[in-house]
Image (spheres, rainbow, N blue to C red):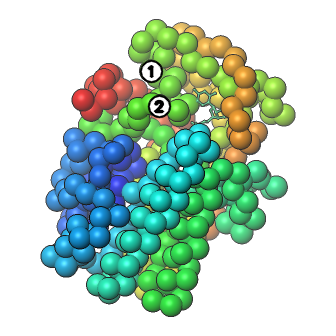
Amino acid sequence: MAILVTGGAGYIGSHVVKELLDNGEEVLVLDNLETGHKEAVLGGKLFIGDLRDEKFLTDLFRKNDIEGVIHFAASSLVGESMKNPYKYYENNVYGTLCLLKQMVAHRVHKIVFSSTAATYGDPVEIPIKEDHPTNPTNTYGETKLAMENMFKWFSRIHHIDYISLRYFNAAGADQSGRIGEWHEPETHLIPNILRAALNKDTVKIFGDDYPTRDGTCIRDYIHVTDLAEAHILAFDYLRRGKGSNIFNLGSQNGFTVKEVIETAQLVLGKEIKAEVAPRREGDPAVLIASSERIKEELGWQPKYSHMETIIDTAWNFIKKHPNGYS
Ligand code: UFG
C-alpha cells in the first residue's frame, strides 16, 4: 500500500518524500505545481493536479491502494493571506474538505498534517506548549487551525486518526544539496540572508526595537530533515493504532535575527550586508516551542537543528541551485 503525499513537490513535502523513499515506502505525490517543483520530487509517482478537482482526486483514490495521507498541499504565505483571505479559505480549507471526502469514501483512516506555530498567535507563555491557547493573528494560521478542527470532527465521526505537526521555523536543506528551499518571492529569513550573500545584496532586518536581547525577533529554527523524520515517526504512530495527537516541532532554542546573520557570516566566511528596516506587521517578538511531547511520545530527537548545520546545508543547496530549480 502507498502513502499519498499532497504538496510533495514543495519545500517540506519534498524532504518528507525523500525520507519515505529512503525508508522503502511506496509513495504517491500529488501537487498542482503552483509553488512546488517537479524536480524536487526525487521518486515515487507524481500526479500533477489539484485537490479541488473532484474527478482527478476520485480517480487517484479509486485507482491506487492508499494506506494513509501526509498532507502539505496548502497556501502558506502569511502576508498574502492578509491580502487574499478567499484564496486561503478556498485552497486550504475547501481543498482539505475535498481530501477528507475521498478519504471517507475510500476508507483511508490515517493522516499526518502539516500545521504551524501560526495557530497559536501571540504567545502568552514561552516556550509554547501544545495546550497553549490558539488565537491566530493571520488568515493563514486561522485556516490551518480550521483544518486541524476538521480533522478532530472527522476523527470522531469517521474514525480518521490524525497527527497534526505544528512547525516552528523550518529551515536548512537535505545534506545531498539536491533539494532545498526555493520560493518565489522568498519571504523567509535564512534564504533571504543567503541570497543576499550570493548576489552581494543587502538583507533587511525587520525591526530592531523589540523587547529581546538585541532588539530583533527571536525564532525557533528547525532543520527540515528533522521535520521529515518526525513525519515518519508520526505515520508509524498511526500505524501502531495510537490514535490522534498534536505535536509541536521546534528545537527549543531561540535565535535573534542578528544572531542568525552573524552565524551565516561565520559559516560562509564572508561579510553579509544588513540594514534595519521597519517592523513587519504581525511579527511576534519571540516564538519558541516546547517539543517535549513529541520527544516523549515518539522518541523524536532533532539531529541537524544547530544553526551552523541549518545554514551550511541551506548554503550548499543555494550554491548548487543559484537560480532555484529552473
Ligand atoms: N525577517 C527579517 N528579514 C527578512 C525575512 C524575515 O528580518 O528578510 C525576520 C522576520 O521579521 C522574523 C524572522 O526574521 O522576525 C523570521 O521570519 P520568517 O519569515 O523567516 O519566518 P516567520 O517566523 O515569520 O514565519 C514562520 C513560518 C510561517 C509561520 C510562522 C508562524 O515560516 O509559515 O512562522 O508565526 F506562519
Of the two numbered discs 2 and 1 in the rendering, the one whose residue sits closer to the viewer: 2
159 relative to 120 in the view: left or right:
left
Earlier sequence position, callout 2 versus callout 1: 2
Q: Which residue is mark 2?
A: 186
124 vs 129, left or right, is right
Residue name at image x 35 percent, y 55 percent: 7
Looking at the rendered structure, which numbered label has been put on residue 125? none
At x 25%, y 57%, the residue is: 49
Marks 2 and 1 sit apart, C-alpha to C-alpha, by: 9 Å
Give residue 103's position: percent from left, percent from top.
35, 79
Judged left or right of residue 139, residue 214 is right
Some atom of ligand 1 lies within 8 Å of the CB belonging to the residue at label 2: no
Q: Quadrant of residue 213?
A: top right
What is the crowding at mark 2: few (fewer than 14 residues within 10 Å), some, or many (at least 20)?
A: few
Instruction: Please name the residue that numbered disc 1 is placed on.
Output: 195
Q: How many marks?
A: 2
Q: In this rendered view, identify the residue nearer to me: 176 or 55.
A: 55
- Residue type highlighted by circle 2: Glu
Tag 2 near tag 1, CB within 8 Å: yes
Report the amino acid beneath label 1.
Arg
From this viewpoint, which residue is outermost toward the right? 211
- Residue 318 is situated, as x and y percent measured from the top left of the image, at 36, 26
Q: Residue at x 73, y 60 (%)?
A: 135
- Looking at the rendered structure, the secondary structure element under dot 1 is helix
Could you say whether the residue bearing mark 2 is in a helix, strand or loop?
loop
Quarter of the view holding residue 106: bottom left
* Residue displayed at 31% across by 29% down: 324
Whether residue 297 is situated above or below residue 24 in the rendered picture: below
Position of residue 319 relative to residue 117, above or below, is above
Depth check: 299 or 70 in front?
A: 70
Residue 275 seen in this snapshot: yes
- Vertical arrangement, residue 268 with respect to residue 176, above or below: above
